[in-house]
């Protein structure tokens, strides 16, 4: 049992020049990773899409524009596939929903990024 979330974003919809947007929605580790990639905007778009997909996979009520996507962190260690770490309200919501794990996959081309997340419940 669990949930599936999918999100697609136009790469150009992520304004990497807007420091307020970046700092409000991405963790310092995500910013460091995305900023070091060959296509910074594509990397931020893929990470944003992954955060949205994870949120959808949790099956919890949306908080709209007030939702803190920074509480959903997409981590990459040792050049491995992306992994999900939940913090704050996202972690609490996942625990209340019985979610024990979330897997995510990200891809992009020149125009758009897509991510799929699958959550596992107890």
Image (tube, rainbow, N blue to C red):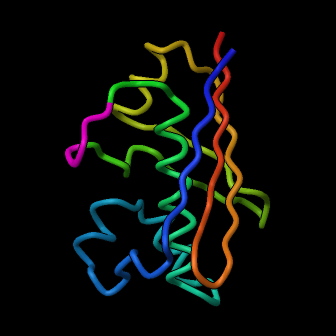
Q: How many marks?
A: 0
Relative placement, left or right, of 82 versus 54 is right
Taking depth in this image into account, of 78 and 110 the one nearest to the observer is 110
Q: Position of residue 44 (x, y in %)?
A: 50, 72
Q: Position of residue 76 (x, y in %)?
A: 67, 60
The chief SS type of the magenta part is helix
Q: Residue at x 42, y 65 (%)?
A: 28
Q: Residue at x 49, y 50 (%)?
A: 51
Q: Residue furthest top?
A: 122
Q: Quadrant of the C terminus?
A: top right
Question: Is 33 placed above or below 29 here?
Answer: below
The stretch in magenta equals 62-66
Question: Is 21 placed above or below 77 here?
Answer: below
Q: Quadrant of the N terminus?
A: top right
Q: Quadrant of residue 80?
A: bottom right
Relative placement, left or right, of 68 versus 43 is left
Q: Position of residue 5 (x, y in %)?
A: 58, 39
Q: Residue at x 27, y 69 (%)?
A: 21
Relative placement, left or right, of 18 versus 107 is left
Taking depth in this image into account, of 38 and 12 the one nearest to the observer is 12
Question: Is 97 placed above or below 79 here?
Answer: above
Question: Is 98 placed above or below 40 here?
Answer: above
Is 83 part of what is drawn in magenta?
A: no
């Amino acid at each position: 049992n669990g949930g599936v979330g999918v999100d697609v974003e136009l790469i150009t919809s992520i304004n990497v020049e807007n420091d307020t947007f970046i700092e409000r929605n991405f963790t310092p580790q995500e910013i460091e990773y995305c900023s070091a990639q060959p296509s910074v905007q594509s990397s931020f778009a893929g990470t944003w899409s992954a955060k949205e997909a994870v949120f959808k996979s949790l099956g919890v009520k949306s908080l709209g524009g007030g939702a803190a996507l920074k509480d959903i962190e997409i981590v990459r260690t040792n050049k491995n596939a992306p992994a999900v770490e939940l913090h704050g309200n996202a972690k609490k919501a996942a625990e209340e929903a019985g979610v024990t794990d979330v897997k995510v996959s990200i891809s992009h081309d020149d125009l758009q990024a897509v991510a799929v997340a699958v959550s596992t419940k107890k």
